[in-house]
Image (spheres, coloured by chain):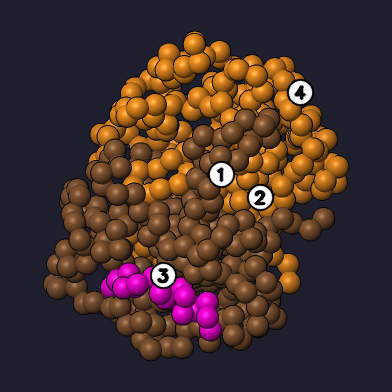
Chain colours: A brown, B orange
Amino acid sequence: MKPDLSVFGIPGIGEIERGAPLADIIGDAIVSHLTTLVQGDIVVVTHKVISKAEGRFAKPVDGSVVEIVENEASAILRRRGELTITRTRHGFICANAGVDRSNVPGEDVVLLPLRPDRSAASIRNRLMKRFGTDIAVVVTDTFGRAWRRGLVDVAIGIAGLPALIDHRGKPDHTGRIMEVTEVAIIDEIAAAADLVMGKATSIPVAVMRGLHVGAQSSGNGKATDLVRSASEDFFL
Amino acid sequence: MKPDLSVFGIPGIGEIERGAPLADIIGDAIVSHLTTLVQGDIVVVTHKVISKAEGRFAKPVDGSVVEIVENEASAILRRRGELTITRTRHGFICANAGVDRSNVPGEDVVLLPLRPDRSAASIRNRLMKRFGTDIAVVVTDTFGRAWRRGLVDVAIGIAGLPALIDHRGKPDHTGRIMEVTEVAIIDEIAAAADLVMGKATSIPVAVMRGLHVGAQSSGNGKATDLVRSASEDFFL
């Protein structure tokens, strides 16, 4: 029986340095591991390799990232000890404005990509040319959540698919019209991909096959479509 | 190339009525669709079929669920119009205490299972006996989140796997010790399974193959391991 959804971790990406041709490196690893991409594939990329290729490094001052975090954040929402909950310039709410020192060689920390949707589009365009088929790209980061312990991967950049699948107004299987069911499909994709990536391993890319989410919706989205405005949010 | 992770939607469950032998019905559908379960499989079940089998129905008063929601909630955190953000008796924070009228025939609404971890364990035990192998079960619901638009599926009950994978103290791929990386693996599993279930379709069960999360950790968890205590939470 063929699975409805298959997720492949893509090994062999290696350490990414500033200026590295990331889309080509990812393409090479996909060829080595999967031979090719097929129509509808979703290539999920952890933002860290993108940040590194884009040179988004910073150097802590006396070992502290406080200044870097404050510089990266558009707002500080909460602070306790070393943990700061911030709004990033993109609008995402996460710890320490996404500034991260894990899986980074040397003393530098890695910042979020400046425009993750644009980074996703750039990788998508390059891979579509190379493999001659329509695919999507999702860029992820690992976020904490309010109320629930543990981190999950979420989408911070996308290209070639919508951020939300809107089931509002469609009948459910009993024929009743569903009231409020907008699914954050890109966050579910990010979470699923993380299951094959792992935090301690060096697998920053996954390919998801079988979802065909593009066909379920018209038009392309942005990851920032998920940002809920402050006036709509109960918990700011 | 074999995928690292495969997810199969399991069709043919049908409408579940109060008192239905749900584990047997799920087992039959798995046999029809997949022949069998293999060691390490994770069976993901949307809570709604469990609630129905357990008779967790309620009847709205004059079409309103307000009274039912207040009865189901252990705390009301926010209220705006028809939307109430609640803490459930299990400790989960979600809209309307999980009271849901979609995919329910007739006028009744469906409540959350009283003890979703126990429901998961019961289904797990029955399927392990039937298929003679060690599997895990995850029970899901669809929750909104603070700050991010769109719903995602999360775990509200589990059996046979830990709620969190703790990477703290392990070296990352550069050899640096990771600081805070507890991954809410069961929420990532729930999200991945939702990708093959869909909200408008009638596929309440998925089987995830290849993850072998049990092997990564000792002992079994509870979904309520994810509940962050009020004193630890910034956003209550």
In the rendered view, does B9 fall on the left or right side of B175?
A: right
Q: Is residue B125 visible?
A: yes
Q: Which of the two discs, 2 and 3, sits closer to the camera?
A: 3
**Label 1 sits on what residue type?**
His
At which x and y percent is residue A221?
Answer: 47, 62
Marks 1 and 4, how far apart at CA: 30 Å
Q: Quadrant of the N terminus of chain A?
A: bottom right
Front tag of 2 and 4:
2
Q: Which three-letter amino acid code belongs to the residue tagged 4? A: Pro
* Res B21 label: 4
- State which region is magenta: A107-126
Q: Is residue A59 magenta?
A: no
Q: Is residue A193 left or right of residue A174?
A: left
Which residue does the numbered mark 2 point to in the structure image? B196
Q: Position of residue B49 (x, y in %)?
A: 66, 29
Spatial separation of the CA atoms under disc 2 and disc 1: 15 Å
Residue, x 14% and y 73% (percent of image)? A61
Dot 2 crowding, Cα within 10 Å, few <14, some 14–19, many 20+: many
Task: Identify the secondary structure beneath mark 1.
Answer: loop
Mark 2 is on which residue type?
Val
Question: Looking at the picture, how far across and down is residue B75, in whole percent?
Answer: 34, 22
Which is in the foreground here, disc 4 or disc 3? 3
Indicate the secondary structure of the residue bearing disc 3.
helix
Amino acid on which the number 3 mark rests in the picture: Asp
Classify 10 Å Cα crowding around label 1: few (below 14), some (14-19), many (20 and above). Answer: some
Is the residue under label 1 in contact with that under label 2 (CB below 8 Å)? no
Q: Residue at x 51, y 83 (%)?
A: A23
Which disc, if any, is residue A117? 3
What mark, if any, has residue A167 been given in the picture?
Answer: 1
